[in-house]
Image (tube, helix red, strand yellow):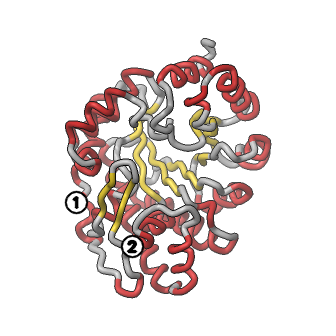
Amino acid sequence: MMRQAGRYLPEYRATRAKAGSFLDLCYAPALATEVTLQPIRRFGFDAAILFSDILVVPHALGQKVWFVEGEGPRLEPVDLSRLSLEPDRLLARLEPVIETVSRIRAELPEETTLLGFCGAPWTLITYMIAGHGTADQLPARRAALIDPEGMDRLVDVLVNASIDYLTAQLRAGADAVQIFDTWAGVLDDAGFQRLVIEPTKRIVAGLRERVPDARVIGFPKGAGGHLPAYVQETGVDAVGIDWQASLDFARDAVQPLAAVQGNLDPLHLVTGGEALDAAVDRVLNRLGGGRLIFNLGHGITPDGLIDNVARMLARVRGRL
């Protein structure tokens, strides 16, 4: 479940309070391992998801990153005309995260999958250029049109950084990795091809040169009709679909190409009740005949209720 180790759990909030800042928690192997394992102990999920954040990559590249309580991430915006990033120091700075992967794998039950992840280049770029999240990612979209050469240089840095980072996670014990492209849906056709498909294709290919059996899940949120091309051209083994995607389209056009992951609306974990049961059943009935990883269509929100998570899992497991 995306963001399964998150603010909806009281044990997470207690551990988070010990860490100091959010980034301190991401870089503290013992604490990050603990919050990764907490939802496994409580719910017995089939997979544990490394507790970290997509923005540790720009932070490790030397960009100033911090988190404002209640508002989210803040970054010192990069200038495409004079990039001053430090890719040679990436893995040294991310060593605590890689140590966390090793610790989690050592403590997980053998049958529980460990998923690592990174942010896709385009989604990282939206934060790196604007300095924060925006509704339509206009600063990054504008930059891609005004300075395509500078954008290409930044994409190159992030593709190589992603290959290095995901390779390290797999070698440390991750069973599969996921590439989160949260802002893929704001791009037009040409932008989607250039800034979502092509960089992801390069990451998957580069990763498999180093780890030939690497299993990769892509999540281009909002991709809609681009999903079949995304799967075919990037070579991912599975693809996440958000809750706005058509289940019939996913079944007929996407599932024959790759396993699909999703796509319950996280709002159901706030509201619960019979509507939650019906939504779970719709996903299972439409997609359960093929390769399916039942999941949310995006991350669980802080106001998600533990009882509703338990109800969802009981429904999926045929106990409700």
Q: Residue furthest top?
A: 319
* Crowding near the residue tagged with mark 1, few <14, some 14–19, many ≥20 C-alpha atoms within 10 Å: some
Q: Which residue is mark 1?
A: 93
Q: Which residue is mark 2?
A: 157
Does residue 130 show up? yes
Does residue 170 show up? no
The amino acid pointed to by label 2 is Val
Front-lying residue, 197 or 311 = 311
Mark on residue 216?
Answer: none
Give the SS element for disc 1: helix
Please, is residue 212 above or below residue 58 in the view? above
Residue 79 image offset from top left, x and y in percent: 38, 81
Is residue 173 left or right of 232 when viewed as pictured? left
Residue 267 image offset from top left, x and y in percent: 59, 36
Q: Earlier in the sequence, mark 2 or mark 1?
A: 1
Q: Residue at x 55, y 79 (%)?
A: 142
* Crowding near the residue tagged with mark 2, few <14, some 14–19, many ≥20 C-alpha atoms within 10 Å: some
How many marks the image carries: the answer is 2
Mark 2 and 1 residues: CB-CB less than 8 Å, in contact? no
User: Residue 190 appears in which quarter of the rendering?
Assistant: bottom right
The amino acid pointed to by label 1 is Arg
Front-lying residue, 256 or 92 = 92
Residue 82 image offset from top left, x and y in percent: 35, 86
Residue 25 image offset from top left, x and y in percent: 25, 44
Q: Residue at x 68, y 70 (%)?
A: 188
Front-lying residue, 189 or 170 = 189
Is residue 155 left or right of 37 when viewed as pictured? right
